[in-house]
């Protein structure tokens, strides 16, 4: 299909996407640091947390640059551990993966850029959250991602706030998006061996290529904005409330289930670990402490 | 091959193996409870731990009994969490697994009995240990298993004691067993994404069918006896020594690696979880608490 005059080139699209993921990272880090400043609960005697950024490079392929990323991690008084990673990588898929990736059978080269956020709060009353969006370019090009929330103690109002923001983002872009992507999320974040969901869900989408790049990119941006719209308020609702040792213990057991999902089932983790991805960045999602008592 | 007169029948072999795994379970539980009684270190004010046994049944297949097992777990003052599981299960492999299991292409029925031990001590100075042996019968029949040790702080004398006991067990049964099974262990218990071994190794063997069932069974028994010969002494050498908060913290980080191995790579865990095995029994191996700080 010929591009309309004035439409961004392939190179411009990649640059736009990468720039967005970095800008979103900055907004999310700033929003979570503001929460650290405001905290007036059980850990108020501690200093507010700040993100520490660590850049990393992917090993070169045949002597050529293969991209890299920046891990941003904060260990704070509201957020026991929160990681916000951005990366932009490129290279050539190994033989083993060409059959699995759309477009890679025709041309094994790829370019991928994305953002990944996982927040594990100190308080068992504050839900953990995950958001990831990405743009992948092979002989094809598509967006993927999603956001889901994992409370230790599910709360109807929090769930309504979270799902509501994602629904709004979806409804702006496709009449069937919310129903489809919510169901996809529920199916994806399920632990069959426990017969339970990872949390209260959210949305999950992949291989999104409607034929209108700008629209797909705008939707992906709105997913990031939905997290910013919903999650800080949910955190503030609960962060200053005291919690009991029993609640903390239960949180650590529930975090064990989070570890089980990420290591046993999460396709991104399995893919990254088995293809020589950056281990620290991939396993940033694991909680700071978890129990299997 | 016709069986020699007086050789045990297939049914007698299964009964002998199952009886051994149960007897070994009793010996191991008794040995570890004796250690709990003797403890005179940092947790001496606590009551000695005792194993609690919980039987479980596999869901029936087509209305027929499919076997089950007994989990034995102790949460003590030397052993923060130790599980000793025995199980004897039987049934029919699903289509998906028939190609992967020796003999199952000819006849999908199977019988399997085994013991699994994982000990996570309270003290970072006492090594964790794992031992598992099993007898599996399809159209073929074989033994498999092994034992390996995971210290937080490797100690040359402990490693010599542990490896020495396994070497003795191997040398009694096959001139090349120790070299082969030690190398297999080092290869199996390796975390590629961390570029590190899970611990100091031990032995690992599978599909052992030398043609002499009695000899293979005797070897498998000796692997269990080697654990009993080596591990209690290693525990006693260190269990009463005080440890620092830094050492405890490092132990919990190392336990995170143990979780990573078991959930990302261990074939038994992946197989069990994906084939509807008993989740509590399979994940008994996970440490009581682990950190990814």
Image (tube, coloured by chain):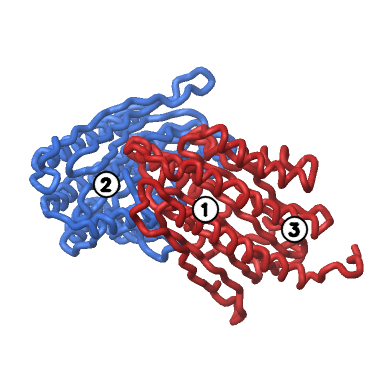
Chain colours: A blue, B red
Residue A120 is marked as 2
Name the front one of labels 2 and 1.
1
Q: In the structure shown, which secondary structural element does the residue marked by tag 2 occupy? A: strand
On screen, residue B106 versus residue B40, left or right, reads right
Q: Which of these two is toward me, B202 or A145?
A: B202
Q: Is A98 above or below relative to B95?
A: above
Q: Position of residue B281 (x, y in %)?
A: 50, 62
Q: In the structure shown, which secondary structural element does the residue marked by tag 3 occupy? A: helix
Q: Residue drawn at (37%, 39%), measured in percent from left and top?
A: B243
Q: Position of residue B272 (x, y in %)?
A: 55, 59
Whole-angstrom CA distance, mark 3 to mark 1, is 22 Å
Extreme residue in the top direction: A63
Q: Which of these two is toward me, A103 or A164?
A: A164
Q: Position of residue B218 (x, y in %)?
A: 75, 56
According to the image, label 1 marks what residue? B118
Q: Is B230 above or below relative to B7?
A: above
């Amino acid at each position: 299909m010929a591009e309309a005059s004035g439409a961004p080139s392939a190179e411009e699209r990649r640059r736009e996407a990468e720039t967005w993921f970095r800008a979103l990272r900055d907004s999310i880090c700033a929003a979570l640091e503001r929460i650290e400043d405001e905290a007036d609960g059980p850990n108020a005697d501690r200093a507010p947390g700040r993100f520490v950024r660590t850049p990393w490079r992917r090993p070169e392929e045949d002597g050529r640059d293969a991209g890299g990323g920046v891990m941003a991690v904060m260990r704070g008084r509201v957020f026991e551990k929160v990681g916000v990673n951005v990366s932009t990588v490129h290279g050539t898929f190994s033989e083993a993966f060409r059959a699995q990736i759309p477009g890679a059978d025709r041309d094994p080269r790829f370019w991928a850029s994305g953002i990944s956020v996982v927040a594990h709060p100190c308080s068992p009353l504050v839900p953990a959250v995950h958001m990831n969006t990405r743009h992948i370019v092979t002989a094809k090009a598509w967006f993927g991602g999603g956001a889901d929330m994992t409370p230790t103690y599910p709360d109807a109002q929090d769930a309504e706030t979270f799902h509501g923001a994602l629904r709004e983002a979806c409804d702006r872009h496709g009449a069937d998006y919310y129903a489809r992507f919510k169901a996809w999320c529920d199916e994806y974040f399920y632990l069959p061996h426990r017969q339970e969901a990872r949390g209260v869900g959210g949305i999950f989408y992949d291989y999104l290529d409607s034929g209108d790049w700008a629209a797909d990119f705008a939707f992906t941006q709105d997913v990031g904005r939905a997290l910013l719209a919903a999650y800080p308020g949910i955190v503030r609702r609960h962060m200053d409330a005291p919690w009991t040792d029993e609640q903390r213990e239960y949180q650590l057991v529930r975090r064990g289930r989070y570890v089980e999902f990420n290591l046993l089932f999460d396709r991104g983790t399995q893919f990254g670990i088995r293809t020589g991805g950056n281990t620290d960045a991939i396993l940033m999602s694991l909680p700071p402490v978890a129990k299997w008592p």
